[in-house]
C-alpha cells in the first residue's frame, strides 16, 4: 500500500528546566508558580503567551517563580525584598541570566 | 479571566479536593471574593469539639495583599477580639506572603487556637485572664466553645430536652468570673450586669483577687 502524505503537523512539548526531577504529576499540571498558582509552563497573569517572554526566575535560595510575579511582589513594600517562600532576602541566582533555555 | 478570580477559584477547588485537612471554604453569595471558611477546634484545647467559622474578604490586589479574616464564631482567646472576632496574627498583617493560601491561612488560625500569644494580644482583658489563671481561662474558653461553637456540653451529654438547652446563658461563666464573687458585690446593691462588667475589667480572678481590695472594686462600681 502506498501512502501519500498530504500534510503533517509537528507537535512539540517543552518544559522549563527547573532542575526538579520529572515527578509523577498527580494533578497533571506540573509545578506551579507559588504566587499566581499557574504552572511554570503557563505564563504569569499579565502575559498572554508562555515562553521566553514570560520566563522563570531563580533565587539563590533555589526557589523559582514566574519572573513577572516575583518582580511584582518584590516591588511591593510589604515584601521587604524577601523571597515569598522562606523570607530570606531575595537574591536572583546567576542561572536566570539569559533565562534557562526551554528544553 | 482576572488573575485574582482564577487563583481564588483554584484555591476553593483545591480545598474541596483535600479530604484530609478538615478545612472548608464556601461561597456566601455570588461574590467570589467574600467567602466563609470553617474548621474544627483543635483537639486537646478548650476549643475541641467546636466548629469555628471565619469571614474571608479577598482584597483587590490579592495575593500581593493579605486576605482579610475575622472570626464569625465567638472565640475566647487572647489573640481574638471577644467582641468583634478581629484576629491578631502576623501573617494577616506584615508577615503575609503571596505563597500563602486561604487554606494555609485557615490552618494557621486553627494552630493559633492551639498556641495563644498573650504577649501580643488582640483582646487585652482575655489575655490578662489567660496569664493570671490558666485554669480559669480554659474553663471560660471551653464554655464559649460549648455555647457559641456548638462544642460538647455537659448538659447535652445528660440528654436534656431542647427546651432546657435554650435556658439562659450563664453570664458569669461567659465573663470568666466566680459566682461567689459576683454575688458578694451584688449583695451590696449594685446591678448584677455592672458587677460582672467591672470584675471582668479588673480581671478579678485567681491570684489577682487577693491584690484587689473590696474598696477598689466598689470605687470602680461607683464610677
Image (cartoon, grey):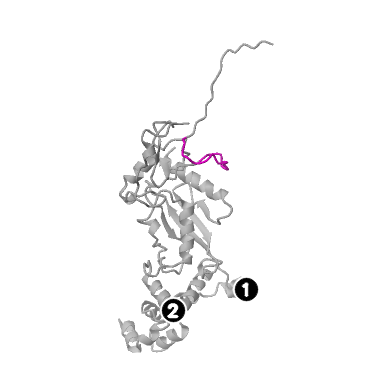
Q: Which of B4 and B31 is in front in this view?
A: B4
Q: Which of A84 and B7 is in front in this view?
A: A84
Taking the spot 55% from the left edge, 72% from the top edge, the residue there is B166
Label 2, label 1: how far apart the Cα atoms are: 27 Å
Residue B88 lies, in percent from the top left, at 39, 62
Of the two numbered discs 2 and 1 in the rendering, the one whose residue sits closer to the viewer: 2
Work out whether residue A6 can be spotted: yes
For residue B117, which numbered disc appears in the image? none
Residue B160 lies, in percent from the top left, at 62, 74
Q: Is residue B144 above or below residue B2?
A: below
Q: Is mark 1 on a helix, strand or loop?
A: helix
Residue A99 lies, in percent from the top left, at 39, 34
Report if residue B24 lies within the magenta region: no
Taking the spot 36% from the left edge, 35% from the top edge, the residue there is A97
Judged by its main secondary structure, the magenta piece is: loop
Q: Mark 2 lies on which chain?
A: B
Q: Which residue lies furthest to the right in this view?
A: A1
Taking the spot 38% from the left edge, 73% from the top edge, the residue there is B125
Q: In which quarter of the image is the N terminus of chain B?
A: top left
Q: In which quarter of the image is the C terminus of chain B?
A: bottom left
Q: Nearer the viewer, residue A59 or B87?
A: A59
Span of residues in magenta: A16-30
Q: Is mark 2 on a helix, strand or loop?
A: loop
Residue for badge 2? B133
Residue B68 lies, in percent from the top left, at 40, 54
Q: In this view, does B97 lie above or below B193?
A: above
Residue for badge 1? B157
* Left or right: B25 in relation to B117: right
Q: Mark 1 lies on which chain?
A: B
Amino acid at each position: 500500500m502506498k501512502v501519500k502524505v498530504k500534510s503533517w503537523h509537528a507537535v512539540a512539548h517543552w518544559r522549563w528546566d527547573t532542575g526538579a526531577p520529572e515527578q509523577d504529576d498527580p494533578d497533571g499540571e506540573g509545578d506551579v508558580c507559588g504566587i499566581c498558582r499557574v504552572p511554570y509552563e503557563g505564563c504569569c497573569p499579565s502575559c498572554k503567551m508562555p515562553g521566553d517572554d514570560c520566563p522563570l526566575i531563580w533565587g539563590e535560595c533555589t526557589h523559582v517563580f514566574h519572573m513577572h510575579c516575583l518582580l511584582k511582589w518584590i516591588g511591593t513594600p510589604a515584601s521587604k525584598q524577601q523571597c515569598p517562600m522562606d523570607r530570606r532576602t531575595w537574591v536572583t541566582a546567576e542561572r536566570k541570566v539569559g533565562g534557562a533555555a526551554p528544553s | 479571566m482576572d488573575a485574582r478570580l482564577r487563583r481564588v477559584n483554584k484555591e476553593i477547588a483545591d480545598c474541596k479536593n483535600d479530604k484530609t485537612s478538615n478545612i472548608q471554604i464556601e461561597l456566601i453569595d455570588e461574590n467570589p471574593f467574600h467567602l466563609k471558611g470553617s474548621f474544627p477546634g483543635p483537639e486537646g484545647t478548650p476549643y475541641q469539639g467546636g466548629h469555628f467559622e471565619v469571614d474571608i474578604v479577598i482584597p483587590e490586589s490579592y495575593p500581593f495583599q493579605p486576605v482579610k479574616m475575622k472570626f464569625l464564631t465567638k472565640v475566647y482567646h487572647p489573640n481574638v477580639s471577644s467582641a468583634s472576632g478581629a484576629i491578631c496574627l502576623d501573617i494577616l498583617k506584615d508577615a503575609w506572603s503571596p505563597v500563602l493560601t486561604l487554606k494555609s491561612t485557615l490552618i494557621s488560625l486553627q494552630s493559633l487556637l492551639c498556641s495563644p500569644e498573650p504577649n501580643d494580644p488582640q483582646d487585652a482583658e482575655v489575655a490578662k485572664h489567660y496569664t493570671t489563671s490558666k485554669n480559669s481561662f480554659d474553663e471560660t474558653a471551653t464554655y464559649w466553645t460549648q455555647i457559641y461553637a456548638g462544642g460538647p456540653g455537659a448538659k447535652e451529654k445528660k440528654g436534656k430536652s431542647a427546651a432546657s438547652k435554650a435556658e439562659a446563658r450563664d453570664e458569669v461563666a461567659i465573663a470568666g468570673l466566680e459566682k461567689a464573687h459576683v454575688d458578694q458585690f451584688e449583695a451590696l446593691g449594685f446591678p448584677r450586669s455592672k458587677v460582672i462588667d467591672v470584675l471582668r475589667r479588673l480581671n478579678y480572678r485567681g491570684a489577682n483577687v487577693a491584690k484587689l481590695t473590696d474598696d477598689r472594686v466598689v470605687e470602680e462600681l461607683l464610677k
